[in-house]
Image (tube, helix red, strand yellow):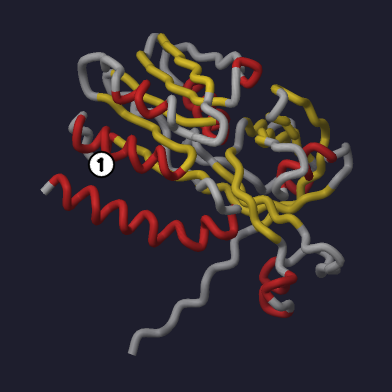
Amino acid sequence: MTERQTPRTPTTHRALVLRRERLTPHMIRVVFGGDGLREFATGPYTDSYVKLLFPAPGVAYPQPFDLAAVRRDLPRDQWPRTRTYTVRRWDPAALELTVDFVTHGDEGLAGPWASAARPGDELHLAGPGGAYAPDPTADWHLLIGDESAVPAIATALAALPAGAVARVFLEVGGPEEEQKLESPGSVEITWLDRVPGEPGAVLVPAVTGAAFPPGRVHAFLHGEAHFVRELRRHLRHDRGLTRDQLSVSGYWRRGKDEDGWQASKPDWNRRIEEEQEGAGS
């Protein structure tokens, strides 16, 4: 009989808010620091992410914070709520961790928290994870996403070798949401204004109708799950990209919060694989 494995509790780190900055009308940058980040470290990935742990209202957690004890001793509805965010920047010398939050007023959990964050506020986080970095052997790079993917795309562009060719397609709420993205590469960025309430409606035809440079591409496609699904199909079957040329993930799905999306994401990914691999057979 195979023994059932106990899920591993991730290592957590205590982070204190150092400062906050509004980058655009709907994006806020929070810089965390403190000795609780002394054991934190990112790997080689430009899409490194952390799980931010937001306390359940009115719940007293063990001090020092112990996620394993929380999961062992408290009912699930009292566990911290988890939200996943890209590491925009990590400075190990200064112990400063930068995270950019997309905000929509009072909607959601993490956005309102970031809007109200003040120096000294405490938050625990787990991670980091990650899986993508630009392939230095690729002839060119394709990066596609929406606001949720801007931090990872910005980090990838900054990591490109000098002169590396990159095409970027970013769909955002409007011109006021555009940011200056620095890179040593030769980068062409196409900013696209979203049709309200229709994520991907402008992005998908812009990508499918684009003339791609010659050579082997390494692609990064992240953002709202529906347009990610559609563009993954296009890149795999119309453009002929292989799996190893693609980093693909639905960061979010319209109509669901992260709790609902993460619960359904494995089945969503499985169905996409079956559908699209079947179409290519």
x 52%, y 57%: residue: 262
Which percent across, then down, holds residue 150? 55, 28
Based on the displayed image, in which of its 4 quarters is residue 65 positioned? bottom right
Please state the horizontal and vertical placement of residue 44, each as a whole percent of the image: 47, 37
Residue extending furthest toward the bottom: 1
Residue 116 location (% of width, % of height): 84, 40
Q: Quick check: 121 above or below 20?
A: below
Of residue 134 and residue 43, the one placed in the foreground of this image is 134
Give the residue number, with chain letter if any, for mark 1. 243
Q: Going 63% across and 59% down the picture, which residue do you hit? A: 11
At x 50%, y 37%, the residue is 47
Mark 1 closeness class: few <14, some 14–19, many ≥20 residues within 10 Å: few
- In depth, the one of 25 and 244 nearer the eye is 25
Tell me which corner region of the image, top left, top right, bottom left or bottom right, holds residue 97. Answer: top right
Q: Secondary structure at mark 1?
A: helix
Q: Name which residue type carries label 1.
A: Arg
Instruction: Using the image, determine if residue 221 lies above or below residue 21.
Output: below
- Which residue reaches farthest left? 281
Say whether residue 160 is left or right of residue 63: left
Q: Is 281 left, or right, of 19 in this rendering? A: left
Query: In the rendered view of the protein, which quadrant contains the N terminus?
Result: bottom left
Query: Relative to 125, does residue 92 appear above or below in the rendering?
Result: above
Residue at left offset 45%, top offset 57%: 265
Q: Position of residue 257 (x, y in %)?
A: 60, 53
